[in-house]
Amino acid sequence: MSMAPKILIIEDEPSLLKAMEEALLVHDFQVATAVDAGRGMEQVQEFKPDLILLDIILPGKNGFEILKELKSSPEYAKIPVIIMSNLGDEEEINQSMSLGAADYLVKAEYDLNEIVNRIKKYLPQSHAGIQKQD
Amino acid sequence: MLGFKSKTKKGSSLEESLKTDFITLSSHQLRTPLSAVKWFTEIMMTQRNGKLNQKQLEYLREIYRSNERAIALVNDLLQVSRVQEGKLHLDLTDVDLKSLVDEIIDSHRSQLTANTISYNFQVINGPLPKLALDKVKIRRVFQNLLNNAIQYTPRGGSVQITLKNSPREIVCSITDTGVGIPADQQSKIFDRFYRGTNVSKIQPDGTGLGLYIAKSLIEAHRGKIWFESTEGEGATFYFSLPKSGK
C-alpha cells in the first residue's frame, strides 16, 4: 500500500501557511512546513517531499534561489515544485518556469480546492490515483 | 525588499524602476491578506470545523464575493499600470481561436443558462489559421466582452459570437440584445474608469476598466477594437487580429 503523498510548503506568511496546511491535511496528504529557505532545505532532506509548494518572497534566500538549488541537485531535481506567489508579473512567471518549476500559481486567484487538484496533477505517478476526493 | 529582481530593462530610469517595484510590491502586499480572507472563508464554508446556520453561511458567501471583487480590482489596476508603463509583454504562441472561444463559452455556460440568454457561435470562412497571440490576454478580452454582453442583456435575450476569416485578419464579434450604449456616451466607453449611466444601474460593482484593458490588449497585438450600438437595442463589439502577428 502506498503512503500518502508528502507535501512541503515553504511560505513565510503564517495565515496562508495555516490555511494551506489545513486544506492539505483534510485531503490526507502528509504535510511539512518551513518559513524560510534554511528550514525549507532542511525539510527537503529530512521529510523527503513528493512535491514542494514554494513562495518567492521569503526572508533570506528567495524562492528563485531555492528553486535553482533544488534543480541543480541530482538528488532533488525531480521533485515537482509549484511556485505559489502573489507576484504575478510575466517576468516572475517566466523566470520560475525557466528555472524548472512545474507550475506557477498566483495565490489570490486560486481556491484551496483548485490548489489541491493542481498538486494531484504534478504528483509523481507512484501516487497517482491515491487522492480521489473532489 | 525586491532587490532580488534582476532588472534588465534597457534605458529604464531609476524612477520607472522604483514605480515598477512599488506596483509589484503593492500587488503582493494587497493580494496576501486577500488570499488569507479567500482561503479561510472557503474553509469555513466547508463547515468541517462546525456546522453553520443559514445566516452565517449567507454572510460568509457575501464576504467571499466581496473579497473576489477586491482581488479582481487589484488585478485590473495592475494590468492598467503595466499598460501605462508600456510594460505589457506578449507571450506569443500559436493559438486556435475557435478552440479558445469554445473554451470561454463553456466556462460561461452556467451564467448564460442562469440568465436564460440564448447563444450562438459561428465561424465564417473557416477553417481559421492559428495566429501568434498571447492566449491569456486574448482570453481576457473575450471574457471582458462576453461578461459585459451577459450582464447587460435582459433575461430571454441572446448573444451571438462570430469569428470571421478574411485575407489579412480575423475579426471577432460579440453581439448582444442588451441595453445598448447611449449615443452621447459612445465616445467615452473605452476611457479608463468610465462607466455608462445605464450600465452602472444594472451592475454597480464594475470598475470601468474592462473595456480600457480590452482595447490596450488588442492594440498590443496590433489589432483594432470598435463597436456599434443603439440604446435599448443592444451592441456589437468587434476586434480584429492581424494574421501577420506582432
Image (tube, coloured by chain):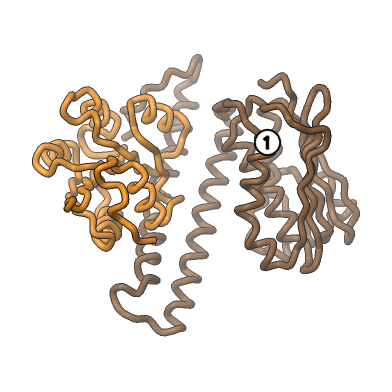
Chain colours: A orange, B brown
B88 is higher (above) or lower (below) than B48: above
The answer, for residue B34, to whether it is visible in the render is no
Q: Nearer the viewer, residue B93 or B207?
A: B93
Q: What number of labels is visible?
A: 1
Which secondary structure, mark 1? helix
- Please, which residue is most extreme toward the left here? A46
Residue B88 visible, this angle: yes
Q: Position of residue A90 (x, y in %)?
A: 47, 31
Q: Residue at x 25, y 26 (%)?
A: A71
Where residue B148 sits, quadrant-wise, is bottom right
Image coordinates of residue B89 in percent, x first then y, are: 55, 27
Give the position of the C terminus of chain A as an image quadrant: bottom left
Q: Which residue is mark 1?
A: B97
What chain does mark 1 sit on?
A: B
Q: Residue at x 43, y 18 (%)?
A: B8
Q: Position of residue B210 (x, y in %)?
A: 66, 47
Instruction: Give the residue at the far front of this rendering.
Output: A1
